[in-house]
Amino acid sequence: MCSINSDFLKEEYRNGYLITDKMKKVWAVELDLLSELDRVCKKYNIKYYAAFGTLLGAIRDKGFIPWDDDIDVWLLRDEYERLKQVAPKEFTGKYYYQDWYNSCGRTWIFSKLRNSETTAIEYPDKGPEFNQGIFIDIFPIDEWDDEVHTNKAFKIVQRELFNCINNPTQVLRGILNGEQYAIDIDTTVELCNDYIKAQQLFEQLTLQNYGTSDIVGYYYDQMRMNNKKYPKSCFDETLYVPFENTVIPVPAGYDIILRKYYGNYMVPVHEKNNHEDRIIFDTDRCYKELSLIHI
């Protein structure tokens, strides 16, 4: 899917922003990870799409946003579960598929594909047993009931499970303060202390209700930004657009999605990304070596 030449790795300015040769090397590793993901998805006829800033960059910049440092992709929930099933046997050698089940206590509701021979230290408190190679993020897109089809009981329980996974301290504090929960207190306390069980229940509940709504979105966004949802029909067709020296699939309804996230998205706005000054990148050394240094 992708080949990297020496010119790609050269330092350059884009939109007045300097992209160093070091960041170009990080991009090259991520493009290789994207190529590996593409190989597996094509093998099993699994659909994936550029997401978030990667989608924006694909449409507006025909590549990375100049100040971005990662690749994000989406899969509809049913496709995401299919990828999870084949990932352990397909991603081998330097390629490592990481989700909540093998993340050494990191409570994610998404997954990562990593290059185990490189370094992207995001969690310095983790030792070398936690894979911190350079990565691309893989996000599930879930159905999100509209106002007409809302199953309030389902959404309340789903939200409580999400909070047990992502903010158990706040949930436990709420119990001590007398707050009421749909899930009984003993079970809530158990789930706050067993994120794997909470994660399993969250995914089971989500899958049980899949196929009941025409509105979709990334669940984490729904918890924080209520307008970040869009018609499922946005993903009915796939377009392939240029992305650096390759192509990347995007949902045909990308305009609706990008306007939800970025408004007038064709006007570049330099915003500090989530990883700036927070991730230690090294394309030449394994995270196991550097994780011992930076703890």
Image: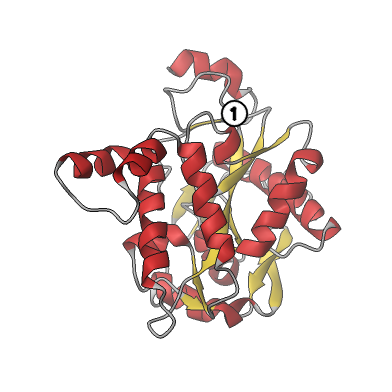
Quadrant for the N terminus, please.
bottom right
Q: Nearer the viewer, residue 291 or 267?
A: 291
Q: Secondary structure at mark 1?
A: loop
Residue type highlighted by circle 1: Asn
Residue 82 to residue 266: above or below: above
Residue 30 image position (x, y, % from top left) = 64, 45
Q: Nearer the viewer, residue 261 or 187?
A: 187
Q: Which quarter of the figure has residue 23? A: top right
Residue at image position (33%, 40%) is 186
Q: Which quarter of the figure has residue 38? A: bottom right
Q: Is residue 190 visible?
A: yes
**Residue at the limit of the structure toward the bottom, as seen here:** 148
**Residue at the limit of the structure toward the right, as seen here:** 43
Residue 8 image position (x, y, % from top left) = 68, 48
Q: Is residue 54 visible?
A: no
Quadrant for the C terminus, please.
top left
Q: Residues within 10 Å of mark 1 (few under 14, many from 20)?
A: many
User: Is residue 114 rendered to the left or right of residue 4?
Assistant: left
Q: Nearer the viewer, residue 224 or 64?
A: 224
Q: Which quarter of the figure has residue 103? A: top right
Residue at image position (67%, 44%) is 28
Residue at image position (22%, 53%) is 180
Its colouring scheme is: secondary structure
Residue at image position (35%, 43%) is 188
Q: Nearer the viewer, residue 134 or 189?
A: 189
Residue pointed to by mark 1: 131
Residue 294 image position (x, y, % from top left) = 44, 18
Residue 40 image position (x, y, % from top left) = 80, 52
User: Is residue 215 rendered to the left or right of residue 187?
Assistant: right
User: Is residue 31 rendered to the left or right of residue 273?
Assistant: right
Residue 84 to residue 218: above or below: above
